[in-house]
Image: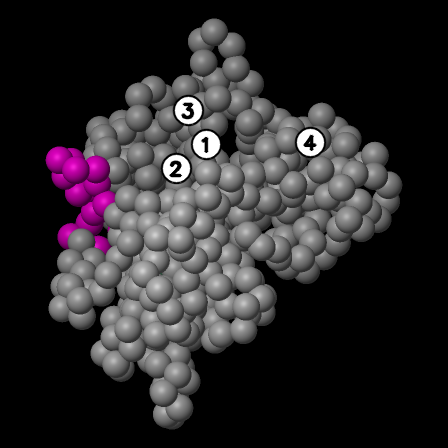
Amino acid sequence: MTGQVVLVVGAGLAGLGAAVELVRAGQRVTVVDQTQAAGGAIHRQPLPGRPSIARTAEHRRWQSLMAEVRAAGIEIRTETRFGGIDSTGEVLLTGAAPGFLRPKALVLATGAREAVQPRPGWTLPGVMTVGAIQTYLKTQAAPPLGRIALAGSGPLLLAAAAQLCALGRPPVAVIEAGRPFAHPLAALRLPPGYLAEAAAYMRRLVVARVLILTASHVTRISEDAAGLTVEIERGARRRRLACDLVGLHDGIRPNDAGLPDIAPIPVVRLGDCREALGARAALADGRNGGRRLAAQLSGTLAPALSQELQRQRRAQGLLARIYANDGADRLATLPGDTVLCRCEMRTLDDLRALGPAPTDRMLRLDGRFSMGPCQGRFCAEWVQRLAGRSGPARRIGAARYPAAPITVADLLAAQKSREGESP
Ligand SMILES: Cc1cc2nc3c(=O)[nH]c(=O)nc-3n(C[C@H](O)[C@H](O)[C@H](O)COP(=O)(O)OP(=O)(O)OC[C@H]3O[C@@H](n4cnc5c(N)ncnc54)[C@H](O)[C@@H]3O)c2cc1C
């Protein structure tokens, strides 16, 4: 695979949409994905032998895209991770199909990741992201054991709560920081599909009598022999809730930490990896981006940008208004011993000890922020805010190679595969 192939990273809607269009335009394509099966976040596949819990419309969309993928003869290498591209254009792959490649172009469709704001107790066992709970539901087709509380903000809380209801284990509460039901005019301007989906989720939650708290914040999570306790604040009111699992979620962000800014070959970012606009936009963006890249590679005229993308951008803007809340402002009121960096257990006090305006270098070398296995995916945004910086800040310091920490064994496996290549 040298110089002739377009490498697509991510077998979700965007990556596969791009791959199909590239092959249709005469390009050779290889897709890699770090998980066990194609699907991405929304179409995460059940483990072998388990049924799918996907809604019918979602299931159909996925079946139809996979039929196109099969018809195009696209190779998908699963359990294979993109490790970065160096200044010569060589890509490192680790995992099941390790090696070094020289693709002619690179499509980065690595999706979104969840933002989770630090709170006292958020690193306790039993506290995870709402997306992790959803992954469990989708792969196991069964709910996790115990009493589950979902907290934070955004439509994913309602979606996951409805899925838990459908599987017979309604959450003990949905604790939403925003006031999504207080904006009926903005809600009515959402595309009809969004409203139908929200109504279906709400129906499930109402029938299961799930406690839904809005304008409410989880201020602390603690544990004792009986399980977890979440402390909730709503204005001046406080309440406590007992549970066994807590799912936290404060929105989604492009999963672009560590991805290269520049490369010696054409590189495009598609879907949630560039702009987290949701599933409908991801497929449209993937297809459109695939056609545009094919046009660039063959020197022909690029097609116009997708109208769907503009529609979904407007819809996401409305959702942001509907779910607006003061959660991020509360960061400044966190106790000093709150863990910010979960990889190296660095606290707010550790950050403050660096002085009033620490540089990236001080944050990394003296503070150890963004230096652990996640390389700031979880903490960079909050550390930057707390360090007094404004604007989008998903990274501390420059992107470096490899894109994420890898083991020596990974590197050796990639090197071995290079040595095994036929000349
Ligand atoms: C946790 C979570 C839950 C969501 N749930 C819903 C939902 O219920 N309903 C809804 O409408 N939308 C949901 N969304 C949004 C929706 O999933 C996305 O908009 C849509 O799936 C984006 O498609 P995509 O192809 O851009 O990315 P994804 O579908 O996320 O696909 C990205 C793929 O890239 C792979 N990848 C990432 N990094 C690497 C790497 N270094 N090497 C190799 N492979 C890599 C991942 O394994 C993944 O398969 C969710 C998003 C998240 C983050």
**The residue under label 3 is which amino acid type?**
Leu
Residue under circle 2? Answer: 132
Q: Would you call the spot at circle 3 few (<14 residues within 10 Å), some (14-19), or many (20 or more)?
A: many
Q: Would you call the spot at circle 2 few (<14 residues within 10 Å), some (14-19), or many (20 or more)?
A: some
- Against 5, residue 237 (above or below) is above
Q: Is mark 2 within 8 Å of ligand 1?
A: yes
| Residue farthest along the right direction in this orientation | 355
- Against 61, residue 41 (above or below) is above
Q: Which mark is residue 245?
A: 3
Quarter location, residue 238? top right
Residues at discs 2 and 1 in contact (Cβ within 8 Å): yes
Residue 47 painted magenta? yes
Q: Nearer the viewer, residue 83 or 4?
A: 4
Q: Which residues are magenta?
A: 42-58
**The residue under label 4 is which amino acid type?**
Arg
Quarter location, residue 18? bottom left
Quarter location, residue 17? bottom left
Of helix, strand and loop, which one carries label 1? strand
Residue under circle 4? Answer: 346
Of helix, strand and loop, which one carries label 3? strand
Q: Main secondary structure of the magenta part?
A: loop
Q: Is mark 1 within 8 Å of ligand 1?
A: no
Q: CA distance from mark 2 to mark 4?
A: 23 Å
Marks 4 and 1, the one that precedes in the sequence = 1
| Residue at image coords 46%, 60% | 91
